[in-house]
């Protein structure tokens, strides 16, 4: 929206959030996990594939390697066989085993609870760290910016940035800290169900009147 003031954009962002929260009250991370270890591994595996695909392989993976220490001792070839269908399985196997070994060596087998400690581990960038902190520990450190969040943020006029780190900073400035984790879930759920990449269903969109990209 041209010439929109920061105050007006913030007010519109709040209205968008409230509408999405009312529509998706059960929005949550769609990766299946039982604890921080499982969420960390599942999130690393989710790169460039779907949550559904990851959820198909993680039950087998966690049955075979039920703990950080078990995965740290794994043979890469064995892990590759289990996660092959997620794509990029060699790099992902190396990353999750490296992650487990790092947690064992540096944190006594406990997944750390700070951004700095998490991003120092193999396979963990800021986005993955935000997923872990927000969902496993309830720590609002940042906004998870995946392809859905990036796309919807641009379409909704909440940012003009293209780089995930800059998109995240704009979103953090618009929304109160206690909403950061849920914001990602809401945008992801809406992006998967209505505002898809190729053909957004603007006629069905509850936030169309607040969206500068709406085709309604």
Image: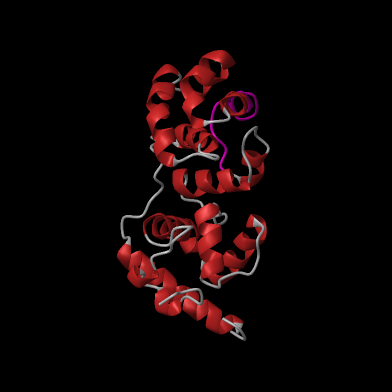
**Residue 128 as seen in the image, left or right of residue 85:** right
Question: x, y (%) of residue 80?
Answer: 53, 20
78 in relation to 26, above or below: above
Quadrant location, the C terminus: bottom left
Looking at the picture, the colour scheme in use is secondary structure
Question: x, y (%) of residue 207?
Answer: 40, 73
142 in relation to 153, above or below: above
Quick one: 44 or 2, which is closer to the camera? 2
Task: Write the start and end of the magenta stretch as one range.
Answer: 100-113
184 in relation to 11, above or below: above
Quick one: 114 or 120, which is closer to the camera? 120
Q: Would residue 117 be counted in the magenta stretch?
A: no
Quadrant location, the N terminus: bottom right
Q: Would residue 110 be counted in the magenta stretch?
A: yes
197 in relation to 156, above or below: above
* Residue positioned 64% across, 24% down in the render: 105
- Total labels: the figure holds 0
* Residue positioned 39% across, 70% down in the render: 202
Quadrant housing residue 189: bottom left
Question: x, y (%) of residue 141?
Answer: 57, 54
> Can the viewer see residue 192?
yes
In the image as oriented, which residue stretches furthest toward the front? 199
**Residue 139 as seen in the image, left or right of residue 119:** left
**Residue 193 as seen in the image, left or right of residue 180:** left
Quick one: 32 or 215, which is closer to the camera? 215
> Can the viewer see residue 75?
no
* Residue positioned 56% across, 83% down in the render: 7
* Residue positioned 46% across, 20% down in the render: 82
């Amino acid at each position: 929206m041209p010439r929109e003031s920061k105050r007006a954009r913030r007010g519109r962002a709040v209205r968008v959030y409230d509408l999405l929260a009312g529509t998706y009250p059960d929005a949550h991370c769609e990766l299946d996990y039982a604890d921080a270890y499982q969420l960390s591994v599942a999130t690393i595996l989710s790169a460039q594939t779907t949550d559904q695909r990851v959820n198909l392989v993680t039950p087998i993976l966690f049955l075979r390697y039920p703990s950080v220490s078990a995965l740290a001792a794994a043979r890469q070839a064995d892990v590759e066989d289990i996660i092959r269908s997620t794509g990029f399985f060699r790099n992902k196997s190396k990353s999750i085993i490296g992650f487990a070994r790092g947690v064992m060596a540096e944190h006594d087998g406990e997944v750390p609870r700070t951004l700095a400690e998490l991003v120092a581990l193999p396979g963990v960038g800021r986005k993955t760290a935000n997923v872990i902190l927000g969902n496993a520990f309830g720590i609002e450190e940042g906004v998870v910016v995946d392809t859905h969040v990036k796309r919807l943020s641009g379409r909704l006029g909440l940012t003009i940035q293209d780089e995930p780190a800059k998109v995240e900073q704009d979103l953090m400035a618009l929304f109160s800290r206690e909403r950061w984790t849920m914001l990602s879930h809401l945008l992801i759920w809406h992006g998967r169900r209505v505002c898809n990449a190729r053909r957004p269903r603007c006629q069905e969109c509850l936030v169309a009147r607040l969206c500068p990209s709406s085709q309604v």
